[in-house]
Amino acid sequence: MPNPVSASRAAASIALRVLQAVLGEVAKDGKVSLDDIARAVELIERGTVELDRAYAAARERCDVEETGGAELAGDCPEPC
């Protein structure tokens, strides 16, 4: 059985990585608005179905960029 603290840390880590990825997508000149942060947090709070859709959309965008020869700096979610 997983340790509850480890599970909590893992969940927090995932949420923070998703938040970072979502905010990275909307950043302009390295900055985001408070509204962008609020929308990203709401996305995470909606749960796995919404996150799965967001992940799939991000992965699809990365696949398109990768086939176009774009170099990516780890901004794309890794395939399962």
Image (cartoon, grey):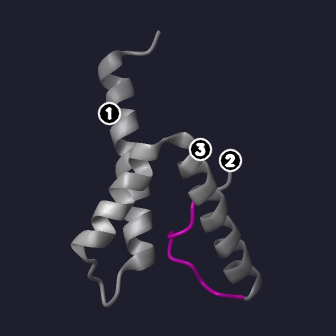
Which of the 4 image quarters holds residue 62? bottom right
Q: Is residue 17 visible?
A: no
The earlier-in-sequence mark between 1 and 2 is: 1
Q: Is residue 23 visible?
A: yes
Of residue 22 and residue 43, the one placed in the foreground of this image is 43
Determine the residue located farthest toward the left in the rendered image.
34
Q: Amino acid at mark 2?
A: Cys
Query: How far separated are the C-alphas under marks 1 and 2?
Result: 20 Å
Query: How far separated are the C-alphas under marks 3 and 2?
Result: 16 Å
Which residue in the structure is indicated by mark 2? 80
In the rendered image, the vertical position of residue 2 relative to residue 30, given as above or below: above
Q: Residue 77 colored magenta?
A: yes
Of residue 27 and residue 65, the one placed in the foreground of this image is 27
The x and y percentages for residue 10 are 39, 35
Q: Is residue 67 left or right of residue 29?
A: right
Q: Residue at x 50, y 70 (%)?
A: 75
Please tell me whether mark 1 sits on a helix, a strand or a loop: helix
The x and y percentages for residue 3 are 37, 15
Q: Is residue 63 left or right of residue 7?
A: right
Q: Residue 54 colored magenta?
A: no
**Crowdedness near tag 3: few (<14), some (14–19) or many (≥20) residues, C-alpha within 10 Å:** few
Which residue in the structure is indicated by mark 1? 9
Which residue in the structure is indicated by mark 3? 49
Which of the 4 image quarters holds residue 6? top left
Q: Residue at x 60, y 66 (%)?
A: 58
Which of the 4 image quarters holds residue 17? bottom left
The x and y percentages for residue 1 are 47, 9
Prevailing secondary structure class for the magenta stretch in the rendered image = loop
> What segment carries the magenta color?
69-78
The earlier-in-sequence mark between 3 and 2 is: 3
